Amino acid sequence: MHETDMTKALIVTVRKWWSEQPEKPQISGIHLTVGKFTCVEPVSLQFAFEVQTRNTFLEGAKLVIQETPLIAFCHHCQQEYQPEIGIEYACPTCLSPMEDIRSGRELKIDRVEYSSDSVETSYAPNI
């Protein structure tokens, strides 16, 4: 279950940012973009996040996951297509192998929502 390791890395990344803040903000949400081709199960990631953030600075924070589809580009046909993960990766028109992935490998923190001194805001890390 690599979602557990991914969650640990997420917590370490957010903790680093949080610990650098002069006033430790209350984090209310973390927004992630997760591509379908990463093979990350959002439900498993949510579960791992809930378990690993208990009794930590992230307890009660919501993990919001935006999934992006797997989109490939066929240079032969000059068209984008959506391969069926685990079933068929070749171009549906000419059957050329998938060579150019345009979307679906993302795994990033989009933003962190937090409040400090009664002010709510968000932070978009440069990761």
Image (cartoon, rainbow, N blue to C red):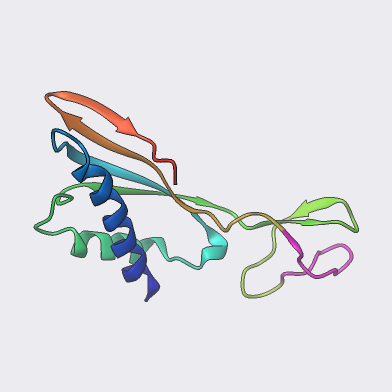
Residue lying at 53% horizontally and 54% vertically, measured from the top left: 106
In the image, 58: left or right of 84?
left
Magenta region: which residues?
89-100
Q: Is residue 83 above or below residue 65?
A: below
Residue name at image x 52 percent, y 64 percent: 38
Q: Is residue 90 found inside the magenta-colored segment of the image?
A: yes
Q: Is residue 116 above or below residue 74?
A: above
Q: Quadrant of residue 92?
A: bottom right
Q: Is residue 12 left or right of residue 19?
A: right
The image quadrant that residue 104 belongs to is: bottom right
Numbered label tally: 0
Q: Quadrant of the N terminus?
A: bottom left
Q: Quadrant of residue 26?
A: top left
Residue 49 at x, y percent in the picture: 26, 60
Residue at 76% x, 64% y is 99
Q: Position of residue 126 (x, y in %)?
A: 44, 41
Question: Which residue: 69% across, 63% down?
Answer: 83
